[in-house]
Amino acid sequence: NKLDGLVMTRLNIVHRYNDDMKNTIQLLKNPTGEFPESHSKYRQKLFNENTWKNSLEKMIHKHYKKKEGWQDRFIVEWQILSAQNKGLGSVSEINRFIQNILWKSGHLGRLVTSYNDMDFYIGDKVINCDNDYNSDPPLYNGQIGIIDDFNEEHNLISVKFDYNDETHNYDTTYSYTLKDFKYNVILAYATTVHKSQGSGFENVCLIMSPESQMWSKTGKSLLYTGASRVR
């Protein structure tokens, strides 16, 4: 149909999701509130406040079997999501835990800076939290990358963004002043479900801590948003 010169098309198929993901989304929309059943692309595990970290570490090592270079692949291929920034099973707790795993494995380099109870090392996975339309190319809120270098003489921190699946490298390098970095960058092994909106990842691990009051209020939509971040 045409309306005032505009061509209108009805969208019948969401091509972003494969059949398994479409089945999961239908289950998440189930008005009875039943928990989704597992299928080939979806696994569930009951949250246990005493063992969830151990379960998360086991999942990572089982997936990669500690093969050489597993750390780089994990950083690119996995995104962990949580509903809250603080507390049990939160983004901040997960980030510190994953960072410690990578540190013990020898993957992270020297300390770059520390602020807001976060340490940042060369090799850390981070997310940009502001827009810079004047850079070339522009840098956007929500872009995920890794810390590549720190120039102590000029207090400049280089972060590589835009991972290229074909070349297995990053296409963009952005330099932050130390001040701008502290205002605009946070760790990103885990992010909130809210911050993940609009992004897609190869693998998603959604941590559903009962401590977060958001699950009882908006759990259905959070679960839907988190699960549908999988490409």
Image (tube, rainbow, N blue to C red):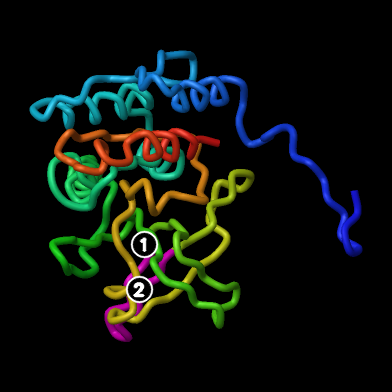
Residue nearest the viewer, comparing 80 with 20: 20
Q: Is residue 228 left or right of residue 136?
A: left
Q: Is 124 located above or below residue 176 in the figure?
A: above
Badge 2 amino acid: Ile
Q: Is 90 located above or below residue 14 in the figure?
A: below
Q: Which residues are magenta?
A: 148-159
Residue 163 pos. (x, y %): 53, 52
> Which residue is drawn at the image coordinates 33% and 53% (left, top)?
188
Q: Is residue 51 magenta?
A: no
Residue nearest the viewer, comparing 42 with 11: 11
Q: Is residue 74 left or right of residue 228?
A: left
Name the image quarter holding the C terminus.
top right
> Which residue is drawn at the image coordinates 17% and 69% (left, top)?
115
Q: Residues within 10 Å of mark 1 (few under 14, many from 20)?
A: many
Question: SS of the residue at dot 2?
Answer: strand
Pointer 1: what residue? Answer: 147
Q: Main secondary structure of the magenta part?
A: strand
Q: What label does residue 157 carry, if any?
A: 2
Badge 1 amino acid: Ile
Question: SS of the residue at dot 1?
Answer: strand
The numbered mark, 1 or 2, whose residue comes first in the sequence reads 1
